[in-house]
Amino acid sequence: MVNNSLPAPEQDSSKTEDSARDCCTNCDKCSTCAMQLNVPAFMRFYVQWQKADAQLQAKLKEAYAALGQKASRCRSCGSCERACPHQVPVVARMQELYWRFEM
């Protein structure tokens, strides 16, 4: 489960979505989620949120609500991260999605 007692994540300006490491390429190898979460869809939300202006962020919040799944269901087991060939920090991004879309 995503630890709801953690503080909101801070933006790390040293990392960019375009860096060779931790760049999601939508390969779907993270679909190994034991909770049957659509991890690739969550990662697409994360990437879109990072690039969105305020108007698009409002639309993304509506789309997230319609997704039918919540990042807060993540149990932080790390199976998605182990499957990722690009070392994307999926668990941390799920935590951030929780804060951005569910709080």
Image (tube, helix red, strand yellow):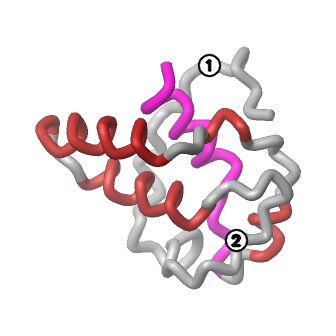
Tell whether 18 sits left or right of 74: left
Q: Main secondary structure of the magenta part?
A: helix
**Mark 2, residues whose alpha carbon is within 10 Å: few (<14), some, or many (≥20)?**
many
Front residue of 11 and 39: 39
Label 1 secondary element:
loop
Above or below residue 15? Residue 25 is: below
Residue depicted at 49% across the width and 19% down the height: 103
Tell whether 52 sits left or right of 85: left
Q: Circle 1 sits on which residue?
A: 7
**Residue 5 lies in the magenta stretch:** no
Say which label, 1 or 2, has the lower sequence index: 1
User: To which quarter of the image does residue 81 belong?
Assistant: bottom right
Front residue of 35 and 10: 35
**Residue 92 lies in the magenta stretch:** yes
User: To which quarter of the image does residue 36 belong?
Assistant: bottom right
Front residue of 82 and 70: 70
Check disc 2 and give the amino acid type.
Cys
Q: Circle 2 sits on which residue?
A: 30
Residue depicted at 66% across the width and 33% down the height: 72
Label 2 secondary element:
loop
Above or below residue 78? Residue 40 is: below
Front residue of 11 and 73: 73
Please report the bounds of the magenta region as a residue range.
86-103
List x then y, in percent, for residue 74. Answer: 74, 43
List x then y, in percent, for residue 42. Answer: 52, 55
